[in-house]
Amino acid sequence: MTSSAATPNRIRVGSAPDSWGVWFPDDPQQVPWRRFLDEVAEAGYEWIELGPYGYLPTDPAVLGAEIAGRGLKVSAGTVFTGLHHGPAVWDETWAHVASIAALTRAAGADHLVVIPAFWRDDKTGKVLEDRTLTAAQWRDLTTQTERLGREVRDTFGLRIVVHPHADTHVDTEDNVSRFLDATDPDLVSLCLDTGHYAYCGGDSVKLIETYGERIGYLHLKQVDPEILAGVVAEEVPFGPAVARGVMCEPPAGIPALEPVLAAARRLDAELFAIVEQDMYPCPPDKPYPIAERTRRFLRSCGV
């Protein structure tokens, strides 16, 4: 295997609308999409994600011109799914996924980030369903995710990467391991979000070392351990936790990103590492300086 020092450029760094406080297609508290594109390019990033469908233009020609005109490229689109509900939700799920996957493919990306359904609303904190899946729901989640991976690959030529996320059923070390052990590596890879995994008590380096062949994509993010301790103690939902500042600017939080990136380099695989610092809602002038400093910090880490 090639040494990690010899392959730093196999990790391609980017950012996403999330780092500009964007969670929704249209929200008056969010920066306009043209400003996001201008600033992400000025901050030194080459790659971006599409963010919530409808935030950036959904016309492929318009999107392509806006992105290319700023020297940007697209790494992935993002979909939200509730596949633990079984085959009954497939048609609705596919209708949602297909439009986003088509735009993602047209934009030149190869990946589709899949986020499982929230068991409580990330904005209001309302409990939507039990936080623990039954054995039957686990079977539906894994088999339907494999089906999604196959259909997305065969129809659009994209690879799905499932994103463990706070307040979903794929969150902790135990749940992530259970999900990976029950899914086909040829159809399902993982988008390891270092912040969400730490938020839920996981160790990103350990996960990379244990399931390295399943790591298909990275989201670089840190959590403030002091704020997180309060969030956990008070059982604060994810949305209000973000408003408290639980996701913080690197390198102030956990996990340390240097060892995570070193472990990723040892995989000797091409990976995207997309910066995502959840900040919804935030003042419009807050994201750009953070994004610029974060890009400098990541260069100091060798990526």
Image: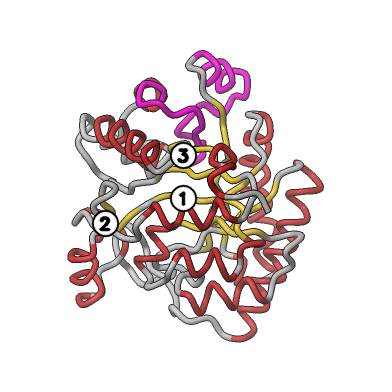
* Mark 3–mark 1 CB contact (< 8 Å): no
Q: Is residue 66 magenta?
A: yes
Q: Which mark is residue 253?
A: 2
Pick out the residue farthest to the bottom: 135
Q: Is residue 69 left or right of residue 202?
A: right
Tell me the amino acid under the disc marked 3: Val
The residue at which mark 3 appears reads as 303
Q: Residue 51 in the image: x percent, y percent?
A: 47, 40
Please give the name of the residue rendered at 20% of the width and 75% of the height, measured from the top-left corner.
234
Please give the name of the residue rendered at 63% of the width and 29% of the height, measured from the top-left corner.
107
The residue at which mark 1 appears reads as 219
Frontmost of labels 2 and 1 is: 2
Q: Nearer the viewer, residue 124 or 211?
A: 211
| Residue 81 visible here | yes
Magenta span of residues: 41-69
> Nearer the N terminus, badge 3 or badge 1?
1
Q: Residue 285 in the image: x percent, y percent?
A: 21, 29
Q: Secondary structure at mark 1?
A: strand
The CA distance from mark 3 to mark 2 is 19 Å
